[in-house]
């Protein structure tokens, strides 16, 4: 990161995560006025679409900055700037952006907002403290960030994002695209912890878990319980029956909700016949294999998992 400002203010301009090492660097005297610091940020943003957020701090001495008066600037579509920071510096920058700076304007938040502390029971003290240290004081400030993952918040990983998503959903603060994205992330988390057979057998339950606002730790306990359930083996007779009846979709669902069938023990009876006139075990195995192949053929067309895109 590059530092701008030797006397009063320090500015860090960060690009996207894959360009973490790039920054806006300059030489000469640093800006002492918030408007100059803001101008440096907007110039960097105009130079590349990959730059998405910035920090501005007041320098307290040669070795430190005042984090209590820090400001986070987040780039939004249509040349709007989302500003996080409740101190004097933040208010000065808000006033500048409300008037417009080189075509950039402030992204306004609702007058009534939800304090971060109100959601601490949902976020947990660790996540709430993580967000507070980064400058967030309300849930609406979090919602206005297009992608929290690009801010490089320390220890903010996929599981933390699920916790934040659940808290925002509980307060009805996410729009439809964000809800779908949150559900997709939770669905991926759920699918990664269960086998295909467990997912297929519990499709309706998993749909609800993916879309509810249940705390992710509780979801993990439920998933652990489901993963411990014994999945019964497929019965070759059922696979044979479904194959003979021309029901590949039913065979696919049946096969995917059970472990692979165990072939019956071989007998000394002539191939293709039995004493009672029924198909031998060898032919039953062949029919079972055919049903399994048919199941695989239609697997891509059968939604046995209860996809969250319904």
Image: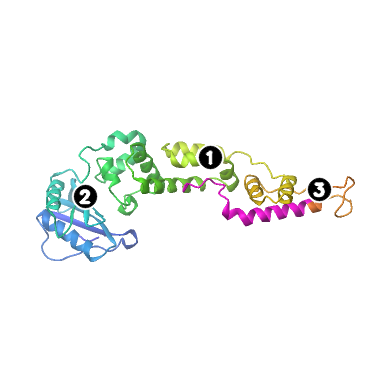
Query: Magenta part of the protein: which range?
Result: 284-310
Q: Secondary structure at mark 2?
A: loop
Q: Is 267 left, or right, of 6 in this rendering? A: right
First of labels 3, 1 by sequence position: 1
First of labels 1, 2 by sequence position: 2
The residue at which mark 1 appears reads as: 204
Instruction: Give the answer, above or below, for where 59 lies relative to 127.
Output: below
Residue at screen point 15% across, 52% down = 97
Badge number at residue 107: 2
Of badges 3 and 1, nearer the viewer stands: 1
Question: Which of the 4 image quarters holds residue 79?
Answer: bottom left
Q: Can you give x and y, in whole percent of width and height, for residue 290 in the image? A: 71, 55
Residue closer to the observer: 230 or 296: 296
Badge number at residue 265: 3
Residue closer to the observer: 83 or 132: 83
Q: Residues within 10 Å of mark 2 (few under 14, many from 20)?
A: some
Q: Secondary structure at mark 3?
A: loop
Label 1, label 2: how many angstroms apart (C-alpha)? 40 Å
Quadrant the N terminus occupies? bottom left
């Amino acid at each position: 990161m590059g530092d701008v400002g030797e006397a009063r203010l320090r500015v860090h301009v960060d690009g996207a995560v894959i360009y973490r090492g790039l920054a806006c660097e300059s030489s000469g005297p640093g800006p002492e006025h918030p408007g100059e610091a803001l101008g440096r940020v907007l110039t960097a943003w105009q130079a590349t679409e990959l730059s998405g957020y910035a920090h501005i701090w007041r320098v307290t001495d040669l070795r430190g900055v005042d984090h209590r008066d820090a400001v986070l600037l987040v780039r939004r579509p249509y040349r709007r700037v989302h500003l996080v920071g409740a101190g004097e510096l933040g208010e000065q920058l808000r006033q500048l952006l409300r008037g417009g700076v080189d075509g950039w304007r402030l992204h306004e938040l609702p007058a009534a907002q939800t304090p971060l502390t109100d959601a601490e029971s949902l976020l947990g003290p660790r996540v709430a403290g993580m967000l507070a240290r980064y400058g967030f004081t309300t849930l609406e400030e979090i919602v206005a960030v297009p992608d929290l993952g690009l801010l490089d918040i320390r220890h903010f990983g996929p599981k933390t994002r699920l916790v934040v998503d659940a808290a925002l959903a509980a307060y009805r603060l996410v729009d439809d695209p964000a809800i779908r994205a949150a559900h997709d992330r939770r669905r991926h988390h759920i699918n990664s912890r269960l086998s295909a057979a467990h997912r297929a057998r519990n499709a309706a339950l998993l749909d609800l878990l993916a879309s509810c606002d249940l705390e992710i730790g509780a979801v993990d306990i439920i998933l652990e319980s489901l993963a411990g359930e014994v999945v019964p083996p497929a019965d070759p007779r059922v696979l044979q029956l479904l194959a003979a009846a021309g029901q590949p979709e039913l065979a696919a669902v049946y096969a995917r909700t059970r472990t692979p069938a165990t072939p019956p023990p071989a007998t000394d009876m002539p191939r293709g016949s039995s004493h009672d006139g029924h198909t031998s075990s060898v032919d039953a195995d062949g029919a079972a294999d055919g049903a399994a192949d048919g199941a695989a053929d239609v697997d891509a067309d059968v939604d046995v998992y209860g996809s969250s895109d319904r």
